[in-house]
Amino acid sequence: MGISVGMGRTLILIGLLIAGAGVLISLGLPIGRLPGDFTIRRGNFSFYFPLATSIVISLLLTAIMMFFGRR
């Protein structure tokens, strides 16, 4: 019939997470430049792999989903 309540809450949560990340970036938090992020530059080629940033984001999202997933 329409979008379920659970789907609506999930979309709101995702929107708040994106807005929160935007605020943190605008305040100068070095997201994407953590120790453990790899950058390789050779001539015309550059490769960036944000390993540490990916781990931190994964841990934060896991904690948030565990908190909101409990009923």
Image: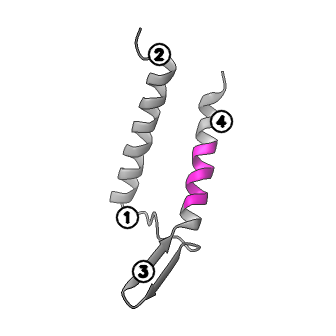
Mark 3: secondary structure: strand
Query: Mark 1 is on which residue type?
Result: Gly
Select label 3 or label 4 by which is in front. Answer: 3
**Which amino acid type corresponds to the residue marked 4 in the rendered image?**
Met
Q: Closer to the observer: label 3 or label 2?
A: 3
In the depicted structure, whether residue 63 falls above or below residue 71: below
Return the disc, 2 or 4, that comes first in the chain's sequence: 2
Closer to the eye: label 4 or 1 = 4
Q: In the drawing, does residue 64 fall left or right of residue 26? A: right
Q: Secondary structure at mark 4?
A: helix
Q: Which residue is mark 3?
A: 46
Query: How much space separates mark 1 and mark 3, taking CA atoms?
Result: 24 Å
Quadrant of the drawing holding the N terminus? top left
Quadrant of the drawing holding the C terminus: top right
Q: Position of residue 27 (x, y in %)?
A: 35, 59
**Label number found at residue 28:** 1
